[in-house]
Image (tube, rainbow, N blue to C red):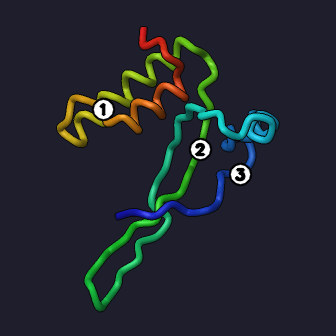
Amino acid sequence: MANLAGRLPEGDRNGLAAIAGELVENPEKVHVAIVLLDTLKITSNVDTGDVVPTARLRRIEIIKDAKDGHAMRRLLQREWERRTGKTVLPFELEEEMRLAFGDDEA
């Protein structure tokens, strides 16, 4: 288990600012982004022994170029396969990828 800090990077490290209007006008659209993150803090529960890291976003950039998006789709699928050991995407992940990258997998 891991948590995500609720704060975005400041200044030019926050690429979400570039699409703020689009997020308002088209809230259902799925966007592709690259994020850099690290660990902000680690919380330990003395009773259970659970140790939970909280990740901090260091930088976020939105991918707008379709060619880069296709490369990102391949990377996302490859890393999901490595992490899970599965080769067929579950329907919900396939649908998320279709929404983010479009129908064309080329």
Question: Residue 77: x and y, percent?
Answer: 34, 28
Residue displayed at 68% across by 43% down: 14
Judged from the image, the secondary structure of the residue bearing numbered disc 3 is loop
- Residue on which disc 1 sits: 89
Quadrant assignment, res 78? top left
Residue 59 badge: 2
Name the side, left or right, on which 3 lies relative to 79: right
Local crowd size for mark 1, using a 10 Å CA cut-off: few (<14), some (14–19), many (≥20): few
Disc 2 vs disc 1: Cβ atoms closer than 8 Å? no
Residue displayed at 60% across by 33% down: 31
Task: Tell me which numbered mark, 3 or 2, is placed earlier along the sequence.
Answer: 3
Residue displayed at 47% across by 16% down: 70
- Residue on which disc 3 sits: 10
Task: Tell me which numbered mark, 1 or 3, is placed earlier along the sequence.
Answer: 3
Q: Amino acid at mark 2?
A: Arg
Quadrant assignment, res 99? top right
Residue displayed at 56% across by 31% down: 32
The N terminus lies in quadrant:
bottom left
Question: How much space separates mark 1 and mark 3, taking CA atoms?
Answer: 35 Å
Name the side, left or right, on which 105 lies relative to 32: left
Q: Amino acid at mark 1?
A: Leu
Front residue of 34 and 98 = 98
Judged from the image, the secondary structure of the residue bearing numbered disc 1 is loop
Question: How much space separates mark 3 and mark 2, taking CA atoms?
Answer: 9 Å
Residue 26 badge: none
Relative to residue 24, is residue 40 depicted above or below? below
Front residue of 90 and 76 = 90
**2 vs 1, front mark:** 1
